[in-house]
């Protein structure tokens, strides 16, 4: 397989990312996202070994990520349920290496390159197009409930869509613990979920891709209308998830784009108008504004429940402060008879990591996020993908305060792309290491 063919396949993989199936064979779900990722990893590793050259990024984000994943692997030794730990670990091992492959094929030497090449923009455009198509489907699904009723749409998704895209076992758990409905000003409304397991995961996908679309709209005058349309579809899809954590993350993500707009003097008005429209849409459109404002009401039902969950997670952390209870084992502290696909989580990525991998794991994860942010910030300037990655990272980090976001295959692929850009931004071209 030639280098250009391999890169083209990666671009297609990113385009198809949210639409890849998870068929269930003999009771076992087979995620095409994870299978595809493993094929890329195996192909890249095999070619590297045959050429007796293994090229790895030497950067702080990469070192922190490697240490974090290693700790999670070792945590199997003290996990009460090693099977749960190994399931989560295998997910990470099947996705995170993509960050090295994205870096190697697209962003190697990115810190010294004054301009970005066409392959980088094709990768970005595939991601934007994919998310925009998903946004259109999210809008369609949301609107359909006002024609057919939310119950009919929910039943259709439960029977025909969710089992195909998340697997039958996970679909059964989702059906029993659904978060698809929300009460808005006394009216029950179905949130946009499309083919994702729940609205928060879908909102994260939109939040990771929206900054790239917005910045492309600001910088590309020839295709501005196209990118503005894509941004509108992605943003609307995100808003229709009614995920309050995503709303808060969106505000911080948009704030992080403002310095970029300031640098783009010639298109400053366009950027300001875009952000102004988004801000109006978010804060002054009913029922969006009331949903956003309720995020800060600690007495509101779901908020109070989330705070109670956080308090329980903190207690677990206090009992196992150094290395935690083992990867994937937080649910066992809440239910001794937990299944391998339990919906129980800390509803906070940082607390979940602290309970399962202790303070050491939390520090390593913070090291990943902070070093990635600094690498992207140093590289970020007008006309760079680093600014889109930086804003996406802000969304990812803030959203993590409200949900556990590190076990979604699709979103981990997007996060791996952000890591790859950071690897490139903090690396000079390294000589190959002998295998």
Image (spheres, rainbow, N blue to C red):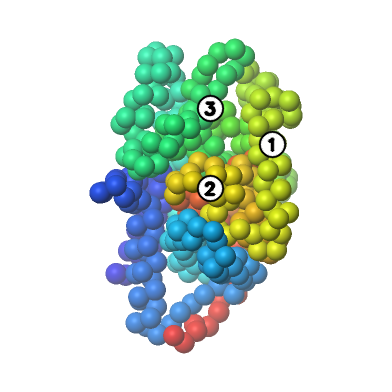
- Which residue has dot 1 on it? 308
Q: In this view, does 300 lie above or below 425?
A: above
Q: Position of residue 29 (x, y in %)?
A: 33, 48
The extreme front residue here reads: 336
Q: In this view, does 249 lie above or below 289?
A: below
Q: Name the residue under label 3.
A: 240
| Image mark for residue 336 | 2
For the point 49% across and 46% down, the residue is 337
Give the number of the disc on residue 120: none
Image quarter of residue 288 = top right
Neighbour tally class for label 1: few under 14, some 14-19, many 20 plus, Cα within 10 Å:
few
Q: Is residue 240 visible in the rendered structure shown here? A: yes
| Residue at 44% from the left image edge and 85% from the top image edge | 435
Q: Which of marks 1 and 3 is nearer the N terminus?
A: 3
Label 3: which secondary element? loop
Q: Which residue lies furthest to the left in this view?
A: 26
**Residue 132 sits above or below residue 315 on the image:** above
Q: State the residue in front, 198 or 426.
A: 198
Count of marks, rendered view: 3
- Answer above or below: position of 368 versus 339: below
Whole-angstrom CA distance, mark 3 to mark 2, is 36 Å
């Amino acid at each position: 397989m030639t280098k250009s063919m391999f890169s083209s396949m990666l671009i297609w993989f990113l385009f198809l990312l949210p639409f890849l199936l998870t068929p269930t064979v003999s009771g076992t779900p087979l995620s095409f996202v994870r299978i595809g990722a493993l094929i890329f990893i195996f192909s890249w590793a095999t070619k590297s070994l045959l050429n007796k050259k293994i090229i790895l990024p030497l950067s702080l984000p990469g070192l922190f990520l490697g240490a974090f994943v290693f700790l999670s692997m070792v945590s199997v030794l003290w996990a009460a349920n090693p099977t749960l730990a190994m399931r989560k670990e295998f997910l990470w091992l099947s996705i995170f290496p993509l960050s090295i492959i994205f870096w190697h094929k697209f962003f190697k030497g990115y810190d010294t390159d004054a301009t970005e090449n066409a392959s980088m923009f094709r990768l970005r455009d595939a991601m934007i197009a994919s998310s925009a198509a998903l946004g259109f489907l999210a809008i369609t699904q949301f609107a359909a409930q006002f024609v057919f009723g939310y119950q009919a749409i929910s039943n259709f998704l439960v029977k025909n869509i969710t089992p195909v895209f998340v697997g039958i076992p996970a679909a059964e758990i989702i059906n029993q613990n659904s978060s698809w409905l929300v009460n808005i000003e006394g009216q029950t409304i179905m949130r946009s979920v499309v083919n994702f397991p729940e609205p928060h995961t879908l909102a994260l996908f939109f939040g990771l891709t929206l900054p790239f679309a917005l910045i492309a709209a600001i910088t590309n005058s020839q295709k501005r209308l196209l990118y503005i349309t894509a941004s509108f579809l992605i943003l609307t899809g995100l808003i229709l998830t009614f995920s309050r954590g995503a709303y808060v993350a969106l505000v911080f993500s948009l704030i992080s784009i403002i310095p970029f707009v300031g640098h783009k003097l010639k298109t400053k008005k366009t950027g300001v108008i875009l952000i102004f429209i988004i801000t109006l849409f978010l804060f002054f459109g009913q029922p969006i504004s009331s949903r956003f404002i309720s995020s800060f009401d600690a007495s509101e039902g779901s908020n109070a429940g989330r705070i109670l969950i956080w308090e329980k997670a903190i207690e677990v952390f206090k009992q196992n402060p150094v290395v935690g209870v083992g990867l994937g084992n937080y649910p066992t502290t809440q239910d001794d008879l937990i299944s391998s696909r339990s919906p129980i989580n800390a509803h906070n990525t940082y607390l979940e990591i602290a309970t399962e991998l202790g303070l050491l794991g939390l520090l390593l994860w913070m090291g990943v996020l902070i070093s990635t942010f600094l690498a992207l910030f140093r590289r970020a300037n007008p006309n760079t993908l680093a600014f889109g990655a930086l804003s996406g990272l802000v969304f990812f980090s803030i959203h993590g305060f409200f949900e556990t976001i590190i076990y979604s295959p699709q979103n981990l692929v997007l996060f791996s792309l952000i890591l790859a850009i950071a690897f490139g931004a903090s690396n000079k071209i390294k000589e190959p290491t002998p295998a």
